Image (spheres, helix red, strand yellow):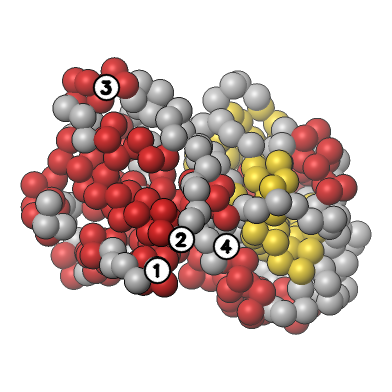
Amino acid sequence: MSEAQAIDVLVMGAGTIGCYIGGNLAAAGVRVAFVGRPRVLGALAQHGITLTDLKGTRNHVAPGVIQLFDAVPTGARPALVLLTVKSGATAEAAAELAAALPQGTAVLSLQNGISNAAVASAAAPALHVLPAMVPYNVAELGPGAFHRGTVGRLAAKDDPALRPWVAVFERAGVPIDLHADLLPVQWGKLLLNLNNPVNALSGLPLRDELLERGYRLCLAALMDEALAALDKARIAPARLAAVPASKLPGILRLPTPLFRLVAARMLRIDAKARSSMADDLALGRRTEIDALCGEVVRLAKANGMEAPRNAKMIELLEAWPERKARWLAKPLQAAMRL
Ligand SMILES: NC(=O)c1ccc[n+]([C@@H]2O[C@H](COP(=O)([O-])OP(=O)(O)OC[C@H]3O[C@@H](n4cnc5c(N)ncnc54)[C@H](OP(=O)(O)O)[C@@H]3O)[C@@H](O)[C@H]2O)c1
């Protein structure tokens, strides 16, 4: 572990999201430090960070401007931590932060799912953990190069610790909106992310998968269970797509020629883009399935319901290492009893 120079923002988990958001803050003059793994740190040390987006924006952060660490640096006093590890690594990362940082340090969980902030809080009760939501997709294009492929604004739970950062994030090109209640926003995102396991099992690029009705029927069924549980729990998911969340399953079930017309915006995706869960399966990494379908199963159960299709999806993802063959749409529908 090495000593830190002055740090404003500490990125815990220098991966795709951490490098994109932390990198943009660094490009705007914020003193950012990154804690990560040797592969990414080596790339950042050699190439710095290059940030691009679909609007043609390009930012570069020179290697010397950022501080890089393989563990939370001793003596660091960041004003804000961005927690950007995948869900399965949350508790461990939070415990490492708690062991090194002052009590009360603000930690923003920029992770998918619903429970990551709660998991981090339980592992690090002395830290001030706040939930946030990243609406856009970021891909690592090469060493130190990160590209944002879709649009949107970050969202976080309103808290006095975050208010001074709103103008800073805006200036850095990663605007953030603060919400009194973030839960509807998180569920709005989770509903869309239910496509991740379907896409991963299909073995197809997102666009090709969404153009096959059989896969859309699987996704619609996962969404139906989530929407029913949300309704029972009296949570109205935020609208993050062109149509309200409740209308999504009906649109997904349309015949493909009609779906192409109605969902033209949804289909404006890079031809090769896949969900990162597909990459996780391909690389034998743990997936975030528990933070997606697992949340639906838990919400349903807490409200006296069941979510058998989401439970099945977890089972299929967990069985992947033995199978390692893509699921065609028909057998997937059959496995989900559709
Ligand atoms: N990528 C996207 O487009 C996107 C969009 C919206 C939301 N999100 C969410 O954002 C979160 C982060 O996703 P991501 O795609 O940025 O993940 P990622 O690229 O895998 O980045 C996380 C990085 O943190 C590292 N890490 C894990 N534990 C660590 C620790 N204790 N100390 C230091 N480094 C550690 C990981 O290394 P190892 O893998 O070696 O452990 C990995 O390099 C997820 O919840 C994801 O769902 C992602």
Q: Is residue 40 above or below residue 242?
A: below
In the rendered image, residue 222, in percent from the top left (x then y), is placed at: 29, 52
Secondary structure under tag 4 reads loop
Q: In this view, does 280 lie above or below 303?
A: above
The residue under label 4 is: 85
Residue 320: image quadrant is bottom left
Give the residue at x 72% y 33%.
173
In the rendered image, residue 242, in percent from the top left (x then y), is placed at: 45, 28
The residue under label 1 is: 303
Give the residue at x 8% y 55%.
334
- Mark sitting earlier along the chain (3/4): 4
Give the residue at x 72% y 46%.
178
Choose mark 2 or mark 4, whichever is in front.
Answer: 2
Q: Which mark is residue 233?
A: 2
Disc 1 to disc 2, how far (Cα)?
6 Å
- Mark 1: give few (<14), some (14-19) or many (20+) Cα within 10 Å: some
Question: Horizontal placement of 311 versus 212: left or right?
Answer: right
- Mark sitting earlier along the chain (1/4): 4
- Mark sitting earlier along the chain (2/4): 4
Give the residue at x 19% y 26%.
256
